Amino acid sequence: MVNFALVVDVHNITTHQFQVAEVLDRNNQTQVAKIERLYRYLKQNFENQRDYSRAGDFHYGEMEMKRLQRSALQQTPYWFYRIMSGYGEMYGQALIVFFGLMFLFGAGFMFCGFTDKDITITIKRDLVL
């Protein structure tokens, strides 16, 4: 069992971004690691209670704390994961990115795709009665 100096009132947490600004201002990696573990334990607790909505909020917070513990270069995959789908918690954002990429690659293929005009395809149709 791990003892935390951070006390959290679970009933008053409405989003994944609760009062971590003071810890982040000090840039203390041990505090961020403690908060990450706290998020993980709270996420597991809510998953065991089958409260997946709150567990998702704590998953988001846990991933943010993991990202903040790394250097700027190592944060890049976490940043893309957050932008693309909100760490897997925002399906609407993932759908927007998916359809945006489909449109982007479709338009790119339409304007920059195959340009070989020498290929011709002929279809011979015979009507058999």
Image: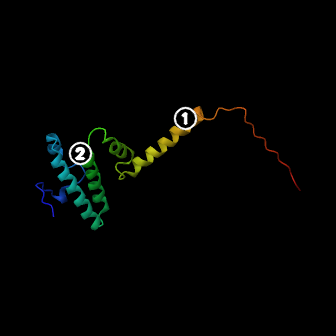
Q: What secondary structure is found at the residue carrying circle 2? A: loop
Residue found at the far bottom of this picture = 49
- Three-letter code, disc 2: Gln
* Left or right: 27 in relation to 56: left
In three-dimensional space, the C-alpha distance between marks 1 and 2, rounded to whole angstroms, equals 38 Å
x 79%, y 44%: residue: 123
* Colouring chosen for the image of the structure: rainbow
Under circle 1, the secondary element is helix
Where is residue 55 drawn, in percent x and y?
28, 59
- Which residue is label 2 attached to? 69
* Image quadrant in which you'd find residue 26: top left
Do we see residue 23 in this rendering?
Answer: yes
Q: Tell me where residue 59 appears, x and y as whole percent.
A: 29, 55
Indicate left or right for 90 with 18 as reference: right
Residue projecting furthest to the right = 129
Q: Is residue 57 left or right of residue 23?
A: right
In the image shown, does 62 or 103 lie closer to the viewer? 62
When the figure is inspected, residue 28 is found, relative to residue 45, above or below; the finding is above
Q: Crowding near pointer 1: few (<14 within 10 Å), some, many (20+)? A: few
Tell me what residue is drawn at x 31 percent, y 59 percent: 53
Quarter of the image with the C terminus in it: bottom right
Q: Quadrant of the N terminus?
A: bottom left
**Three-letter residue code for mark 1:** Gly
In front: mark 1 or mark 2? Answer: 2
Q: Report which residue position mark 1 lands on.
A: 108
Residue 126, position as x, y percentages in the image: 85, 49
Horizontal relation, residue 125 to residue 10: left or right: right
- Residue at 30% x, 66% y is 50
Q: Position of residue 47 (x, y in %)?
A: 29, 64
Mark drawn on residue 70: none
Q: Does the CB distance between marks 1 and 2 fall below 8 Å?
A: no
Residue 19 visible somewhere in the drawing: no
